[in-house]
Amino acid sequence: MNQADLIIKNAHILTVSAQGEIANGCIIVKDKKIIDVFEGPLRNYESKKVIDAKGKLVLPGFVDCHTHLVHAGSRANELQYRLQGMSYQEIQQKGGGIYSSVKATRAADPEKLYQQSLERVKLCLKHGTTTAEIKTGYGLNPATEKKMLDVIHRLNIESDLETIATFLGPHVYPDDQEPEAYIDWLLNEGLELAKKDAEFVDIYCDVGAYTFEDTEKFLNAAKSKRIPLKIHSGQFEALGATGLAADLGAVSADHLDKVSEAEFDALLRAGTVPVFLPGCSYYLKTAYPDARPYLDANMPVALATDYNPGTCPSLSIPMMMSLAVMHMGFTPEEALKAVTRNAAKAINRDDCIGSLEKGKQADILICKIGKLDDLIAMFGGNFVGTVIKKGLLI
Ligand SMILES: [Zn+2]
């Protein structure tokens, strides 16, 4: 008998790997990793910790590959503006939107920023997210951007959520200094900070955010420093940044509500991961983009929450899956792949997380439902029962 740290038996497993669906099988965990996944009853292994998952659905831990989880304050007051019909840009012009989060995040001391973020981390884990990418961008000045990066790293070390840092210094233009001066900082010290403390850089190119010209400058400078690229583009208009990012070899292009045919082709050519954020369409009451052409073209389509205090204050990956299936042309299986394996690809982690297979990190969910369709159908509910991160029960 081989000794294991943890065994899950009698499980209905969706591996999201070449092994596919296992109606009744076992997952064997040792040293934080999955060492075996097989069909049928338990054999060859024993452990002091055995979970009988009869009647339950076992999935890979969800990967939320696009969040703005670290910020201070709340923008729940903007709900009333929204209900009065004000647009995202109008709220921003009134001093709301991103600028109110910038103000609160600048004012918060590191401990307060950490504690507020930690509450959100707990919500992520409760809903089955075991890895999350987190962006900066509520600093728009050197000290606060650095403070945000430090909090993202502290969450990775001290909480059960694995976090990946993305430098989004160019989120919007700061409202307290000339854009040229800030861009100068971004292209020099900002990118040095990103290279040292972040895994990716990102820029928000759209109406009300960065221009195409500044985006081009920033991405080229980041590429010359060999920092992997991400982009926020095509949320409101197709300004060409999606195609630009793909041509520069971006790891992912996110939002994609408005994408030209040429940009679609560029994504396909480059193998850039298209990341859709249906929570924004839901909360901004805008049209959902159709993901079907991307799925039919066999692109590695991913889904994420885009959690942020203004345009999608939700951390629920199952909710995003449901929206994607009901409004964007995903099948339930495609939605699952989009929040596991493909989301892992969007953060360069598909070699170690995102599926249940031999050699991968033991990030596993045991859900209190019998089949995937239930997760999609019973939207708004939370059926994640047990969360296992790196082989440990949380
Ligand atoms: Zn975002």
Image: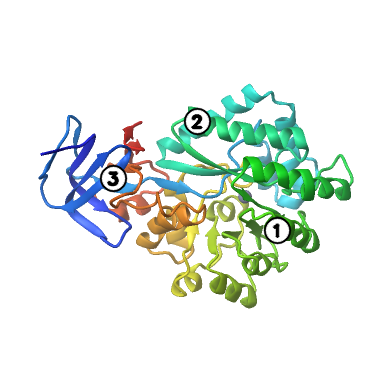
Determine the CA span between mark 2 and mark 3.
22 Å
Is 333 drawn above or below residue 184 in the view shown? below
Q: Which residue is mark 3?
A: 34
Residue pictured at 21% horizontal, 41% vertical:
8
Q: Which residue is mark 1?
A: 224
Looking at the image, tell me whether mark 2 or mark 3 is earlier in sequence order. Answer: 3
Q: Which residue is mark 2?
A: 157
Left or right, 309 with reference to 290: right
Q: Is ligand 1 less than 8 Å from the beta carbon at label 2?
A: no
Instruction: Compare residues 203 and 217 and report the one nearer the observer.
Output: 217
Which quarter of the figure is the N terminus placed in?
top left
Binning the other alpha carbons within 10 Å of mark 3 as few (below 14), some (14 to 19) or many (20 upward) gives: many
Quarter occupied by residue 47: top left
Residue 98 position within the rendered picture, expressed as x and y whole percent measured from the top left? 72, 42
Res. 240 in view: yes
Residue 118 position within the rendered picture, expressed as x and y whole percent measured from the top left? 53, 29
